[in-house]
Amino acid sequence: MKRTILFFIFLFLYLQIFSYVSLYNENLSDFNIALTAKGAGLGDNDFFFNPLLNPTIDCKTENYFIALGFLGLSTRETRSKYVFDSYENSIAKKNIYDNSFLYGEPAYIIGYMPINRFGLYLGYENYINNDYTFRQIYRDDNYITLYDESWIKIGNVNSYFLSLNYRFFNFTLGTNFSILQGDGSDNYSILYVDPSLVDSLSTINENYSGIKGNLGISYDLKDFLSFTFVYDIQTYLTINRVEEISATDTIVNTKTVYYILPNIFSFGFRYRASGVAPADFYLTATYERWSELNGDFYDYNDLIKYNLGVSHTLNRNLSLLYGFMYKPYRKDNRIVDIGFTTGLIYRIEKTEFTVSTQYNNINYEKENVYYNERVLKMILDVSMKF
């Protein structure tokens, strides 16, 4: 009980001090990639727990396995700028926008089936989701309403996948095949109070489809050390888009565009330290070749991401998770996102309950407007072996 109380004290303090800053991230909450609860609590180290990312994991033949996950997100965004007050003859920072919302949905269902020396995973994941709402009413110096601006972006890319692995000696070979499907919408409008001015409306509806795959190999040195390498093949996500723009006239465009994920190489190792209070250490290094996409529309740099996590076992029923993540920005490697995570696992016989949290506090400037975003992400997971 004492250790549990200390954990929640740590969690509270952690939420107060965690700072996440990126000059290039506009609206962090509008682009979320689903994580398993364990991976989220271990510094986004999903590499060791998600068969969609690493098809060589958990090749064991003694148990069937199923896991259900849920993602919850709380976001608050404020915008401010320096405004000259002619009455006070002074310049002050004024809050011009304040918005908050809650978002949540089932994130994944993963099932595992042992077949002799083979391991077979089938699953569904909400691979990428968009959920962002913006609305601001603009007024003049006399506080008379001029126009109303709003922007709503909603969408999901879901993955339906199969991962197959085979174990021989201390090696495990694995491969993954994923079908990506989804849809989304982007609605933007400016509505003027003055009837002589023309309102502007833009509606975009999209359908997403694609195929993703990877290959992996892992090696286990006894029970305390393992190494894994995974190669993700370059992926084209096809986007069928219908745009309708209304102002003086209405224009409808239909076109097909592509979102490209580059070749990705990931290397990770897990070390299990034994003792009075055993712990598992996880480290992943991921190399993403974004520069291969450069051309008329892109100017990217290659980047290397690092994810570090520690799972600390307190007793047979309880484990604590801690993590650290380091991610450079692909347009400028000098801009780095650094963050921390934490989580808790509680076991009852063959059932595990996992809860992990991530808290981001983002400050950046764009076109003389100062953005502040506070995001609390929570991932819940229930898994069972039978």
Image (cartoon, rainbow, N blue to C red):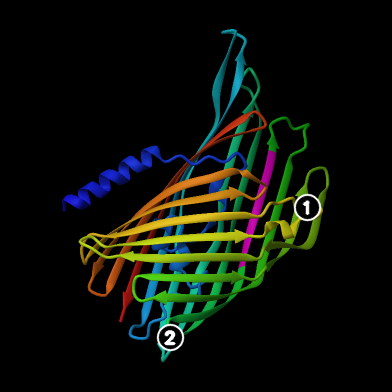
- On screen, residue 122 versus residue 185, left or right, reads left
Mark 1 Cα shell of 10 Å, populated few (<14), some (14-19), many (≥20): few
Question: Which one is in front, 86 or 8?
Answer: 8
Q: Secondary structure at mark 2?
A: loop
Q: Amino acid at mark 2?
A: Phe
Relative to 195, say whether 82 is above or below.
above
- x then y, percent, for residue 15: 37, 42
Q: Main secondary structure of the magenta part?
A: strand
Q: Are dots 2 and 1 in contact, CB under 8 Å?
A: no
In the image, what residue type sits under mark 1?
Answer: Phe
Q: Is residue 195 left or right of residue 376?
A: right
On residue 374, which mark appears?
Answer: none
Q: Residue lying farthest bottom?
A: 116
Residue 42 visible (yes or no): no
- Give SS at disc 1: loop
Q: Name the foreground residue: 79 vs 265.
A: 265
The residue positioned 74% from the left and 39% from the top of the image is: 199
Judged from this view, the residue extending furthest toward the left is 1
Number of numbered callouts drawn: 2
Q: Position of residue 132 (x, y in %)?
A: 56, 48
- Write the start and end of the magenta stretch as one range: 182-190
Specify the quadrant that holds the C terminus: bottom left
**Mark 2 lies on residue:** 169
Residue at (58%, 42%) from the top-left corner? Answer: 134
- Residue 186 magenta: yes
Residue beneath disc 1: 297
Horizontally, residue 200 falls left or right of residue 304, namely: right
